[in-house]
Amino acid sequence: MPDSLPPDSVGVVTPETLHFNAPIKLTCGQALPAFDLVVETYGTLNSDASNAILICHALSGDHHAAGYHSMTDRKPGWWDSCIGPGKPIDTSRFFVVSLNNLGGCNGSTGPCSINPETGKAYGPDFPVITVQDWVQSQALLADRLGIDCWAAVVGGSLGGMQALQWSLSYPDRLRHAVVIASTPRLTAQNIAFNEVARKAIISDPEFHGGRYYDTHVIPQQGLMLARMVGHITYLSDASMGEKFGRELREQAYKFGYDAEFQVESYLRYQGERFSESFDANTYLLMTRALDYFDPAYEFDNDLAKAFGQARCEFLVLSFSTDWRFTPKRSEELVNAMIAARCRVSYAEIDAPWGHDAFLIPTPRYTDIFTSYLDRVGREVSA
C-alpha cells in the first residue's frame, strides 16, 4: 500500500452492519425471523436520493467493492477499477451502495450466523436462497437508506442476474440496469460445473453434513477443488496459455503427481487461498442460486414475456472469449428485451481474458461503461 491514496480512489472505507428486525419470507417457503446485511457506501446521496447506484456482487464477491479498509491494505475492493472519482461509476456524481448478500460469509446473515432457535450456527439448516430473495432483501435495504428508485443497478456475472431480477421484481424502482458478462439462465454445462464443485465439497470427510463448525474444522480439500474447477471456467484458453503455457516449475519432469506445471501450482494456490476465506455452505448456496435463476420459468419459458413488465433501460455487455456465459447468451437476452419493446444497448467486447474480463478495465469496455453511466449521471442532474 502506498503512503498516499490514488486520487481516483474512494479512500479508506468502513463497512456497516444493518439489522432488519422484520421476518423475510423466502422463495423456498421458509423465513428468516431477522437478518443482517453488511454494506459499504461511496460518495454522497443527493437531496432527492436520485443518484444512488446499487452494486450486486458475483459468486465469491462481497460488500468491499472499492477503496481500502486501512492505510496498510495491499489490495483495494474487488471492483476498484470501476468505482471511484472519474471512473465509470463516478463517486463524485453517484452514491454507490455495495453489500454482502444474504447467505454470504462476510458478515451478512448466512450459514455461519447463529440460528436463534438453536443457539448454534445455521450450517446446513440455513434456507436455500434465490436471486429473487437477494433482490427482496436489497429492496428492504433501499427502504432503510431512503432510496425509492435506483439510478442504476449494476452487476457482473451473478451480479448481472440480480440486476435483471430487479427489473422484473421492482420495475418502478430502478431507471437503468447494467448487466455485464451474465446470462438469463444457466446452460446444462454450467449447472454440471456447479454440481462437480458441490460434490467436491460434500464429499470432503471434514464436511460433516455441513456441521463442520461444531468440530472446528473446514472441508478444505473440497473447497480447494471447487474453486479450482470454477477458476478454470473463468479464464479463457488463450489467457491461460499466455500466462502459463506448458511451463514447468523446474526444468525436468519429476514423473510423479505433485504440481509440476506452473498452471497446476497456480490453481492449487488459488484453491488454498479461497478455502481459507470462504465458507463451504455459502458456496453451496451461491451455486444453487445460480442454477435456479430463470426469469422465463414463470412465463411459460417465454423470456420476452418475462421482460414485458420491465420499465428500465438496459445496458448489456458480453466478452468475446467468455465461454462460461458466452456472448450468445447475452444476445438471447437482448433479443428478448427487444421483443418486449425494452430500451436496450448492447456491445460484445473483444477481450482475451474469458469470463474474468468484466473485472479488467480494457479501453473499449471502460469507454462504453463510462459513456453509458455518464448519460445516467446527466439524467440525475437534469
Image (cartoon, rainbow, N blue to C red):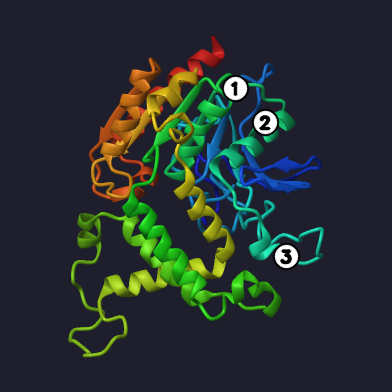
| Residue at the (19%, 87%) spot, across then down | 253
Mark 1–mark 3 CB contact (< 8 Å): no
Q: Could you tell me which quadrant the C terminus lies in? A: top right
Q: Three-letter amino acid code at disc 3?
A: Ala
Front-lying residue, 60 or 130? 130
Mark 2–mark 1 CB contact (< 8 Å): yes
Q: Earlier in the sequence, mark 2 or mark 1?
A: 2
Q: CA distance from mark 1 to mark 3?
A: 34 Å
Q: CA distance from mark 2 to mark 3?
A: 28 Å
Q: Three-letter amino acid code at disc 1?
A: Arg
Front-lying residue, 79 or 151? 151
Q: CA distance from mark 2 to mark 1?
A: 9 Å
Disc number placed over residue 121 in the picture, else none: 3
| Residue at the (76%, 61%) spot, across then down | 114
Q: Position of residue 267 (x, y in %)?
A: 36, 69
| Residue at the (42%, 71%) spot, across then down | 225
Disc number placed over residue 173 in the picture, else none: 1
Element at badge 1?
loop
Mark 1 surroundings within 10 Å by alpha-carbon count, few (fewer than 14), some (14 through 19), many (20 or more): many
Q: Which residue is mark 2?
A: 142
Give the total of numbered labels. Answer: 3
> Left of 212 or right of it: where is 379?
left
Decide: is 374 above or below 165.
above
Q: Earlier in the sequence, mark 2 or mark 3?
A: 3
Q: Earlier in the sequence, mark 1 or mark 3?
A: 3
Q: Is residue 279 visible?
A: no
Decide: is 168 above or below 253.
above
Q: Quadrant of residue 329?
A: top left
